[in-house]
Image (cartoon, rainbow, N blue to C red):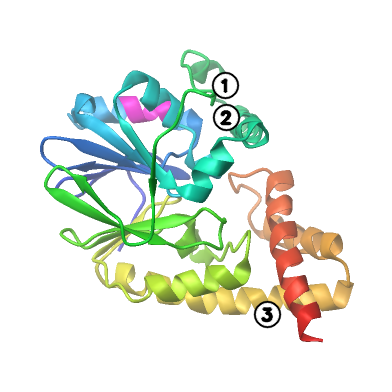
Amino acid sequence: MRIRKPGKVVDRLWYLGHEESGIYLLDGGDEAMIINGGLKYIVPEVLRQIEEFDLNQEKVSKLLILHSHFDHVGIVPFFKRHHPDSEIYASERAWKILGTQNAVDTINAFNQTVTEKMGMAERCSEYDLEWRNDVSGITVFEGDHIAVGDTELHVLETPGHSSCSISAYAPQLKVLFPSDSGGIPYKGTIIPSGNSNFTQFQESLEKLNGLEPDYLCADHYGYWTAEDARIFILRSINLAREHRSRIEETYRRTGNVDAAAQEMTASFYAENPDYFLSREIFEAVYRQMVRHIAKDLEGQQ
């Protein structure tokens, strides 16, 4: 079953935010962790939901960044400033990216673009949501375990969607948090978004396929339970294979990275005009994917 409405996922785990940008609150008993950083414009709604669901915000002592893309780190500055003693976890590569001014400027600019698109600019102006140089934290690696009270998260390095992507698995709850490394669910399909390295993206999917979660908690468009959770990664593997073939065909036919990216983007938005990312951002994503696959094709010649 697929569930898109914020609320309780399973004992001790809550889904918060908006359908297109969700986060998770894991309650470990004497402390809690936020998993994923979402888009910044969800902050007012998350605060309302915490109150509505009678959750204790003061227990939030940890936050896990699954990768550093702008739509997955938007709420981090707000929660760090409101909980200055909280621990922020991310991969080594993510911290390197988040420590550069260019990345911070892009995160702030893209978050503002989406905030305005969603009609939330005035509402969000009431909060301090910008990334600055006051957010730092703890580096995690493949195989690390993070204790959240009496619950534990296992870290898996899953690059390919981004160079800094990690996923997390809670074995006690049988919950997988793959972020976009598992593919981006949208409507009735899954978008295979191997942005930085499509080959690594496919390899990371194979790694995640070894798990058998009862709950698969995506960062966009909800979460899955039972058998739908267990087959999600396999579906993504198959769709990634098909999508790669389509990109290869488009690039061979056009012979140009930009032309192939424009064609793929135009095709996507013709079918999905209401997708939450702007067309310009999405085309930049496609350009990255096509560029990597083009290099692979040229290397095979």
Residue type for callout 3: Ser
- Whether residue 70 sits left or right of residue 142 in the image: it is right
Q: Is residue 236 visible?
A: no
Residue at mark 2 to residue at mark 1: CA–CA distance:
6 Å
**Residue 245: mark in rendering:** 3
Q: Residue at x 11, y 47 (%)?
A: 150
Disc 2 packing (10 Å; few <14; some 14–19; many ≥20): some
User: Is residue 45 rendered magenta in the image?
Assistant: yes
The residue drawn where x is 26% and y is 39% is: 33
Lower sequence index among marks 2 and 1: 2
Task: Please tell me in which quadrant of the rendered image residue 50 appears.
Answer: top left
Look at the numbered disc 2 and give the secondary structure of its residue. helix
Residue receiving disc 2 = 115
Q: Dot 1: within a 10 Å radius of its alpha carbon, few (fewer than 14), some, or many (20 or more) residues?
A: some
Q: Compare marks 3 and 2 and give the one earlier in the sequence.
A: 2
Residue 92, placed above or below residue 173: above
The overriding secondary structure of the stretch rendered in magenta is helix
Name of the residue lying farthest toward the top: 126
Q: Which residue is mark 1?
A: 121
Three-letter code for the amino acid on which mark 2 is drawn: Thr
- Amino acid on which the number 1 mark rests in the picture: Ala
Is residue 65 rendered magenta in the image?
no
**Which residues are the magenta region?**
43-47
Q: Earlier in the sequence, mark 1 or mark 3?
A: 1
